[in-house]
Each structure stands twice: as C-alpha cells, then as structure tokens.
C-alpha cells in the first residue's frame, strides 16, 4: 500500500462540501477516518474480497481540505494490488468491448468499499 499526500489544482473554485460529495459519489474511492496504514491494511485483510481492498484509493477524511478556492489537499492510501487488478481488468474490457466496457466494470461494485 502506498501513502500519498496530494495537492490538486482545479480549474474553478470549490467548497469542502462539494469535494466530499464528489469523492463519495465515485465508487472507486473509499474514505476512512483512520490515519495509519496498518489500520487500513488490517481492515482490508479482515473484510476485503480475498483480503484485498479493491478501491483505487482510500482518502483519509481528516486530512482533506480546500486551501485556496481551487486547491484540494489531503492524504490517501493506495493499495498496490487493487491498482494493478482493476487497471488490468479495465484495460482488457476496454480492448475487448470498447462500447460497453464501463457497464461491464460495474459488476465489481459489490466488492468495493464506501468506507474503510
């Protein structure tokens, strides 16, 4: 699992509420109030499909903030296995089914977490 401090510069102004709503609307992003990698890993081992967190990233909500009107900063945990697994499946589906690959990827939604 990787730990990443991020700073996103957006084209327009945003609010913390809008950022949180967008994060929660994305099924590939999980959220957590945990602040240690070991705690997030442990949750994945105990509750994840085959001991894995398949979300692309897990954002630590206590670290999320809007510094300037168009800058969002925070900290996220990115599981290595989910990145390679989901990216490989998505690339294969897109190659084999270019018109319907997004719809086919939705079958993985039951294995994704909303909160860790």
Image: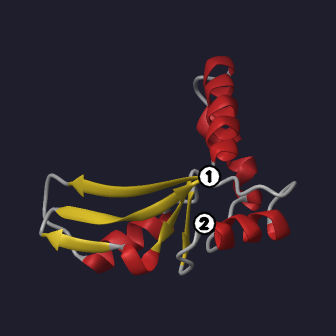
**SS state under label 2:** helix
Q: Which residue is mark 1?
A: 1
Q: Quadrant of the C terminus?
A: bottom right
CB within 8 Å, label 1 to label 2: yes
Q: Which residue is mark 2?
A: 37
Picture layout, residue 49 above or below residue 80 = below
Relative depth, front residue between 5 and 95: 5
Work out whether mark 1 precedes mark 2 in sequence or the reverse, and give the earlier one.
1
Q: Residue furthest top?
A: 95
> Image check: 112 left or right of 56?
right
Identified at 84% across, 69% down, the residue is 46
Task: Give residue 57's quadrant in the image.
Answer: bottom right
**SS state under label 1:** loop
Task: Give residue 53's quadrant in the image.
Answer: bottom right
Picture layout, residue 39 above or below residue 2 = below
Q: Position of residue 14 (x, y in %)?
A: 20, 69
> Image check: 98 left or right of 26?
right
Q: Residue furthest right?
A: 50
Number of other residues with Cα within 10 Å of mark 1, as a class: few under 14, some 14 to 19, many 20 or more? some
Number of other residues with Cα within 10 Å of mark 2, as a class: few under 14, some 14 to 19, many 20 or more? some
Tell me the tag on residue 110: none
Identified at 65% across, 35% down, the residue is 84
Identified at 52% across, 76% down, the residue is 35
Task: Give residue 34's quadrant in the image.
Answer: bottom right
Q: Position of residue 111 (x, y in %)?
A: 76, 58
Whole-number angstrom distance, CA of label 1 to CA of label 2: 8 Å
> Image check: 88 left or right of 14?
right
> Image check: 111 left or right of 84?
right
| Count of marks overlaid on the render | 2
């Amino acid at each position: 699992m990787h730990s990443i401090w991020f700073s996103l510069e957006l084209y327009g102004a945003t609010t913390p509420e809008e950022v949180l709503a967008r994060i929660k609307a994305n099924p590939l992003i999980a959220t957590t109030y945990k602040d240690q990698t070991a705690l997030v890993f442990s949750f994945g081992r105990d509750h994840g499909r085959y001991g894995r967190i398949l979300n692309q990233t897990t954002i630590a909500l206590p670290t999320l903030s809007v510094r300037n009107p168009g800058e969002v900063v925070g900290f996220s945990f990115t599981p290595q296995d989910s990145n390679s697994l989901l990216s490989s499946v998505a690339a294969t589906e897109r190659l084999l089914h270019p018109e319907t690959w997004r719809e086919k990827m939705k079958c993985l939604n039951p294995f994704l977490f909303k909160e860790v």
